[in-house]
Amino acid sequence: MRIDAITLFPDMFGIVRDAGVTGRAHKQGIWSMQTWNPRDFTTDTHRTVDDRPYGGGPGMVMMAEPLIQAVCAIREDRARQHQPDAPVVLLSPTGRPFTQSVANSLAASTAGAAFVCGRYEGVDQRFIDQYVDEQWSLGDFVLSGGEIAAIAMIDATVRLMPGTLNHGDSSLQDSFQDSLSGLLDSPHFTRPEKLDSVAVPEVLMSGNHAHIARWRREQSLMLTLEKRPDLIEQARKKGLLSAADERFLTALKT
Ligand SMILES: C[S@@+](CC[C@H](N)C(=O)[O-])C[C@H]1O[C@@H](n2cnc3c(N)ncnc32)[C@H](O)[C@@H]1O
C-alpha cells in the first residue's frame, strides 16, 4: 500500500516511516510513503503557501494552488508507476472521526491514501470542495497541524496490514476490533508472577484455555461497561453479545 502526504513538515513523517513496527514494515516493502511539500509547487521567490483570510480575522489560510499542484503531482507519479489513484484525505477537526473500522478499511485497500495536512487556520475551501474526497478527524480537539493526525492514522493502519506484527493475530485482540465485538481489551500481565505481593490472576496461570478466554471476555465486558458503555450498546445492536455475555452484564449491574 502506498501513502502520500502533502505537508509543510515532511521530516515529521520519519517517526512512522523509520521507527518501530511501522518502520520495519516499511523496510520490508509492506507499505511505502512519499511526502510532497506545497512549497515545492510555488512560483514566487518567498515560496508562499499561505495568505490572509478574506473577510478578515486572525491567522492565515493555506492557499489552494500549491495544494492543487501537489495533488496533480501525486496523480501523475502514481500513473507513471502504474499504481492506482488514491482518495485525497484532508485531516480536519471537522472531518468524520477516524476509528478502528476506518483503519481496517484503509489497511485492506490497495490504493492507500493521499493525506493533506493543514496548518494555520485551515485550507482554502475551494481546494476542499474540488479536490478532497474525504475528511477525517483524530478527535474532538484542535492540533496545530494535520501531520500528527496523519501519522497516528498511518500507524493505526499499517499495524493491521498482514506481515507487520510479529504475531499475526495480535491485532485481532485489540480494543475496538470486530473480533473483540468492538469492546475494550482485557488487562495484560507478564513476569514476575508476584509484584510487591500482588499476584497475577490465578486463572491466567491455570493453563485452562477456555477459562482464560472467558475471564478475558468478562474483563473486557466489565471495563467497557465502566469506561465506554456506548460500545456495549453498539455490540448489542450488532448482535455481537452472547447469552453468557448478557448474563454477566446483568449480574454486574445487580
Ligand atoms: C489549527 S488547525 C485549524 C483548525 C480550524 N480553524 C478549526 O477550528 O476547525 C490546523 C490544521 O490542523 C489539522 N488538525 C487540527 N486538529 C485536527 C484534528 N482533530 N484531526 C485532524 N486534523 C486536525 C487540520 O489539518 C487543520 O487544518
Image (cartoon, rainbow, N blue to C red):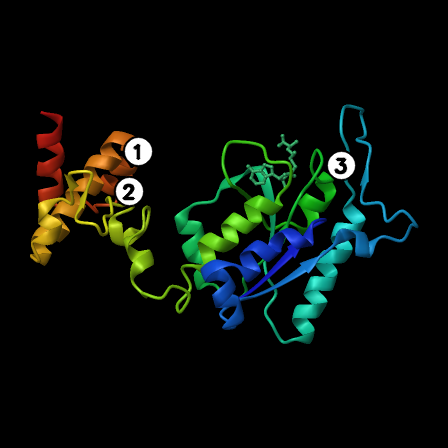
Q: Which residue is mark 3?
A: 61
Residue 225 in percent (x, y) is at 23, 33
Disc 2 to disc 3, how far (Cα)? 39 Å
Disc 1 to disc 3, how far (Cα)? 37 Å
Q: Residue at x 74, y 57 (%)?
A: 70
Mark 2 Cα-neighbour bin, 10 Å: few <14, some 14–19, many ≥20? many
Q: Which residue is mark 1?
A: 228
Asked whether, in this view, residue 130 is left or right of residue 164, the answer is right
Residue 234 in percent (x, y) is at 28, 39
Q: Disc 2 or 3, which lies upstream in sequence? A: 3
Ligand 1 resides in the quarter of the picture at: top right
Q: Disc 1 or 3, which lies upstream in sequence? A: 3
Residue 86 in percent (x, y) is at 59, 61
Are dots 1 and 2 in contact, CB under 8 Å? yes
Give the structural element (helix, strand or loop) at label 1: loop
Q: Residue at x 67, y 72 (%)?
A: 79
Taking depth in this image into account, of 159 and 207 the one nearest to the observer is 207
Please name which of the two marks, 2 or 3, marks the residue nearer to the observer: 2
The answer, for residue 114, to whether it is visible in the render is no
State the quadrant of the C terminus.
Answer: top left
Q: Residue at x 42, y 64 (%)?
A: 161
Taking depth in this image into account, of 31 and 74 the one nearest to the observer is 31
Q: Residue at x 26, y 36 (%)?
A: 224
Give the structural element (helix, strand or loop) at label 3: strand
